[in-house]
Image (cartoon, rainbow, N blue to C red):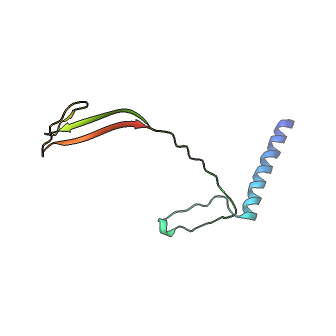
């Protein structure tokens, strides 16, 4: 066996030993939970903190349309005058992304 293989094996063994010993001393790192939400155990660790950054980009509108339907077929009336009556339906369609 070469020196590199021996060194690699020692590092792997040390990592496995470190993981196993920390799990035995401090408890499991991962808790598997099954069942309904009201049947799950609650585990709290108030000794740690977690910082989360939320990016809030401005939305971009790709296209928009004003549509009118009198008998089930939607027709675009963007930049047009529309006659209002009791049976007509109107909708504004917006396609955008964040």
Q: Residue lying at the far top in this picture: please name it.
A: 79
In this view, the residue farthest toward the right is 3
| Image spot of residue 63 (x, y percent) | 35, 32
Q: Is residue 62 above or below residue 33?
A: above
Work out which residue is located at the far front of the displayed protein and give it: 81
Q: Locate residue 25: give its quadrant.
A: bottom right
For residue 76, what is the image quadrant? top left
Q: Is residue 1 visible to us here?
A: no
Residue drawn at (83%, 36%) of the image: 4
Is any atom of residue 19 visible in this view?
yes
Q: Residue at x 51, y 40 (%)?
A: 57
- Left or right of 65? Residue 4 is right
Q: Is residue 10 left or right of residue 31?
A: right
The part of the image, by quadrant, that contains residue 17 is: bottom right
Residue 14 or 84: which is nearer the viewer? 84
Q: Nearer the viewer, residue 22 or 80?
A: 80
Image location (x, y in percent) of residue 38: 48, 69
* Residue 63 shown left or right of residue 74 in the figure: right
Q: How many marks?
A: 0
Image quarter of the N terminus: top right
Residue 93 appears at what percent x and percent y? 30, 38
x 26%, y 36%: residue: 66
Q: Is residue 88 left or right of residue 26?
A: left
């Amino acid at each position: 066996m070469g020196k590199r293989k021996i060194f690699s094996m020692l590092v792997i063994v040390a990592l496995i030993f470190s993981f196993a010993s920390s799990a035995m001393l401090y408890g499991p790192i991962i808790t598997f939970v099954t069942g309904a939400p009201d049947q799950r155990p609650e585990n709290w660790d108030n000794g740690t903190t977690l910082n989360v950054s939320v990016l809030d980009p401005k939305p971009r509108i790709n296209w928009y349309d004003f549509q009118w339907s009198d008998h089930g077929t939607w027709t675009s009336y963007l930049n047009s005058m529309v006659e209002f009556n009791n049976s007509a339906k109107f909708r504004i369609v917006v396609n955008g992304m964040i």
